[in-house]
Amino acid sequence: MKLDEAQVRYTTQEALAVTSADFYFPAVPKPLAVFIDGYPHTKSNQQTKDEIFRTAVRLAGYKTLELPYKNPSMRTLDSLYRAIVDELRSLGYPIPPTKSGLE
């Protein structure tokens, strides 16, 4: 995974008080919880639940990043990776360039 290649510290399926994040980055000053939302998250009842849980996560001091996706292609994965890297950089997290050149 490109995050490993860039030596970015993270965990997957991190249990947070009321929900689980798809990716968790212990960034300073606020840790980042990333939620990658596919089809089940497009339903209104699930969106309501997501907002309740994610609000609780934000109130607990986490920064959240919610990324929708429709089809798991390499283009989609690269786009998700770039969005995560951009958010981490905006939080001051040092991300070295990867060997593949995607930054």
Image (cartoon, rainbow, N blue to C red):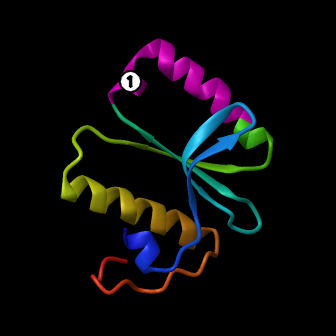
For badge 1, the amino acid type reads: Pro
Image x and y of residue 9, in percent: 59, 71
Image x and y of residue 26, in percent: 68, 63
Q: Is residue 71 left or right of residue 92?
A: left
Image x and y of residue 77, in percent: 29, 56
Q: Residue at x 58, y 44 (%)?
A: 21
Q: Is residue 51 magenta?
A: yes
Q: Is residue 35 left or right of residue 51?
A: left
Q: Quadrant of the C terminus?
A: bottom left
Q: Main secondary structure of the magenta part?
A: helix
Q: Quadrant of residue 15?
A: top right
What residue occupies the far top of the structure in this picture? 45
Q: Quadrant of residue 83?
A: bottom left
Q: Which segment is the magenta one?
A: 39-56
Q: Is residue 11 left or right of residue 63?
A: left
Q: Nearer the viewer, residue 74 or 86?
A: 74
Q: Is residue 2 above or below residue 94?
A: above
How crowded is the residue under tag 1: few (<14 C-alpha within 10 Å), some, or many (20+)?
Answer: few
Q: Is residue 84 magenta?
A: no
Q: Quadrant of the N terminus?
A: bottom left
Q: Is residue 18 above or below residue 79?
A: above
Q: Is residue 12 above or below residue 58?
A: below
Q: Residue at x 74, y 60 (%)?
A: 30
* Residue, disc 1: 40
